Image: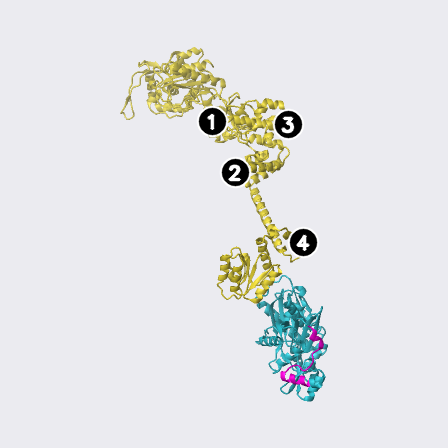
Chain colours: A yellow, B cyan
Amino acid sequence: MAVPILVFSVDKTRGSLLLKIIENGGFKAKLFDNSHELEYAVRRRRPSIIVFDTKHYQSREFKIITSLHSRFHDAEIILFADPAEIPSFTSAGIKKDCCFSDPINPDDVTLKIREIHFIKNKAFLRIKTYFVFLAGLFAGTRDNPYIMFMKKIIMAAAVASAIAAGIAGGFIFYNMSDLPKVQMLESYVPFESSFLYTSDGVELAEFYLERRKFVSFYKIPKHVKDAFIAVEDAHFYEHHGIDFFRTSAAFINNIRAGNAVQGGSTITQQLAKMLFLTPEKSISRKIKEAAISMQIESRYKKDEILAFYLNQAYFGARSYGIEAAAQTYFGKKTEDLSVAEAAMLAALPKAPSVYSPFKDPKKAFTRRNLALKSMLDRGFIDTEVYAASIRKPVPEYIYRRKYAAPYFVEYIRNIMEQKFGDRLYTAGFKIYTTLDLNLQRKAERAVTNGAAALARAGMPGVEAALIAVDLNTGAIRAMAGGTNYHKSQFNRATQAMRQTGSVFKPIVYLTAFKNGYSPDDTIDDMAVSYLSKDGSEKWTPHNYTNKFYGRVTLRTALSRSLNAATVALANSIGMDKVIATARSIGVTSNIYPHLPSAIGVSEMTLIELTYAYTTFANGKRFEPMGYEKITDRYNIHVEDNAPKGVQAIDPANVSKMRDVLSAVVTEGTSIAAKSLNRPVFGKTGTTDSYKDAWFIGFDDNLTVGVWVGRDENRPIGEGMSGSHAALPIWINFMKEE
Amino acid sequence: MSDKNEDAKAAAANQKGVIQTDRPKEIEHFGGPIGLDIGTTNIVSARARGASIQITKQLNAFFTVPASKITGMTLLKNDVLYFSQNGSYYIIGNAADTFANTFNTDTRRPVESGLLSAKEDEALNVIQSIIKTLVPPPKNQGELVCYSIPGEPIDTKISVLHHDTILKRTLQDMGYTAIAINEGFAVIMSELAEESYTGIGISMGGGMCNVCFSYLSVPVFSYSIQKGGDYVDTMVGAAVGESATRIKLIKEKELNLLKEPKNKIETSLSIYYEDLLESLILSIQRVITTSESVPRLSKPISVVLSGGTAMPAGVREKFEKLLKANRLPLQFSSVRMAEDPLNTTAKGALQLAIAEEK
């Protein structure tokens, strides 16, 4: 026995008993009944085990025990003591499981000695130990030297396994407890872009958070599906959510490589992660992922799962789903993708930014060709197709469609955002606008050409805006908010608050007609000074020509745009009535309640004045109308926006307005419009120092408003009145109608 | 042997106070360790003789007769062991009983209640003389003799030290190395070898009962109670108006505690036996529960009864029944009688002597 065991007890009987117990366990030990002999013995040979019985030991300080413990760290001290004394020994470093109390339990003593021997003597390394153990088991020997210890080891292992299994089970159960319900997939609604269409169904724009357009499984070509299966999950149609072989192989490869070089997730697992889980890397997430994957597999067909995946995966460049990706990378629909293009897209979801052809074409090319090789290896394509495909270049830039009518699109987007909030970008609405694409193009051309003409005439940097409204429905048919949307997104048709000049004057005349005047009634056009309300200021309106024309008809006063006569008229009927008239025909901007407002010093937008003129045209007031209907992603109507005209001017006064506005064209400031050779009506406007030039008019179909000016509110140029700067644009647009 | 020589021997014996007779021839030829049971009633020696054990015993009693030349001659002629002291012949051993019966009286004992009797002035001489009849001088100095001593009595304040020391010196003076063995432990040594000398051995003698609990041959506790066969005899005798000697005779020859008592003596014997056994078990209970050394055993242990007092039929069964009725912190597998109850202690002492010699 290589482990020296010393037994100490001053009680002869107990000492002998302990000695016998130890000897009976197959060990040799020596008994001491006085501490001097014990000291002598430990000095001669380092002890491995000291069995110390404190019974009847006179010195209750037990310094010998602490001394032995501190000197022989390797030695185990097995102690017999009163239960009350044991804490003091354990606090001094004696192991708690080596402290025993009366009565002496021979089994405990033997077991403890064997345990220590088993470890100290490295008995566990000897095959003999296990043979003895097995022999004892077969023979049914109860006092086999190792059997008790091995039982303890086995019990401990069993308990540890049970605890580990319990913890693992608990952990899995805990993770399962908040598992999302896979049934949610049945009501799966991915983020989908909303689309804007013209009145005749041409796609105008796409609003999205994640650029995604859902594509049905049957519309995805086989070679596209094959590409993804080859790259992401070769055994997709064979496994039940988890590919254990692939997971194990990935695990081993990752260990060899020292980091995660290979993913072991199946397409189903990736779908589970995308739909229900966060991207964190944790055991908890992996367990949930596996559980959800199996649930998905048990509930859905493989083709359904693949369709979910292809519509959900992220391909980079804000493109979600295969349809959006096909559009972004190739400007195509999924159904039109070639094999090489499908392989390129299949190569992306693993790391969209790393393999993006726009960032690193070489890496993307290599990765794409690897995907093609996988397709070839799995028999999805033949060598001919492979050879042809690997030579195809990868895309070089993001395919962006340039949408027409950007100002109008933005105008509608603002309205829709107020209506739907963020759902506009995720809910997949289809918004059918009132825009007429032909008219829009004409509008944009007219505006651009108009500004260009001014630039050629030495007035660069002049902006212009045009809005065309269907006067029978109030629908916006064209809108050009500026000359170049990409240069400036400020929409001068809807957002610019400008002084209106003479285009406001018809409202004064309408007020007069409503108050019993007729176009043939006369008013004085003469120099009259008006005092401000407090009498501190005096204002004398002058005409554009700096002449006064004496007694003139209302028709003449308007057609010549006489300021003095118009102010006199406004003065006679009262500005409050003028303002009330303006409100009744849809003007919403603030109007100063002073006479200068009669000749257009208050600021308004082009759109509100154009709608006001629409009311002049047929007596009905319309709210601006940019869309006709909205449907959801399933083409179910969300909103029908029917024209809602309100009679605001009685027909007699409409006739009077048409009379006077016609005169503007036939005999007044807008005579150039006669070149259109059809009855048109309208009014020019010019503000001080030629800062703003307006023309708003209508024919039988459209009310068209044009504004010309500079964003910084400087003069356009000398003599650039409404008839010189704005009317030509208006005429150009109307010509082309 | 001539008369002259015998006279000379007797004279020498008178002077030295030693045995006046020849010992059995065979004893002289034995060698090796000796086990010696010095009981209240008998002294028994045990020696190994080949595979068997040779038992020799003498009654541990004496009888005095007035010393006279004719008496001395008669005793010598009849091989009666005696010695002369203070004008009396002390007839010792088995012969003492014969003389006592002849004179219709009781023998006297050098040992009372297990210990050297304080009442008898010549107790020491008597016991030494009897021992010498059983233990021959050693062939070699320091041969082992293991002698039994009682456990410390728990019901009186008497110590066994005096008794033990006297015996030890007697044997050492004879040239032996003397080692003492507790009577109860001797029973264990004799009967529980197959159980690794673990169990309880009880020697129920005339003067006392000795109890020992041993674990793996370590006597964890041993003690005696000063109640034994003599107590039963005396108490029954007093109760029924008979001599203790007669009661003893009835007890040894007729008593069966398993049967219904036939008369008042048997009834009284039954009562006092029960009292003795209850005292014994209560003492075991008391000692076990107060001992600081009794280990916690996972297996039940055996109890072995020995000694003349344990021999009447039904004693074992009564004991077992009472043991089961009392709650003890140990579990018992069986209560059994020793194979040879009258010689168990001597055999056990011999076992120890042999073990020590090895």
x and y percentages locating residue B53 in the rendered image = 70, 71
Residue at disc 1, secondary structure: helix
Query: Which mark is in front, 2 or 4?
Result: 4
Q: Is residue B282 above or below residue A634?
A: below
Q: Are marks 4 and 1 on the same chain?
A: yes
- The region drawn magenta spans B6-30
- Mark 1: amino acid: Arg
Relative side of A536 to A515, left or right = left
Residue at disc 2, secondary structure: loop
- Mark 2: amino acid: Glu
Residue for badge 3: A379
Query: Which mark is in front, 4 or 3?
Result: 4
Q: Magenta includes B29?
A: yes
In the image, A517 versus B185, the foreground residue is: B185
Residue A144 has which mark? none
Residue for badge 4: A135
Residue for badge 1: A413
Residue at disc 4, secondary structure: helix
Circle 2 marks a residue in which chain?
A
The residue sitting at 62% across, 28% down in the picture is A377
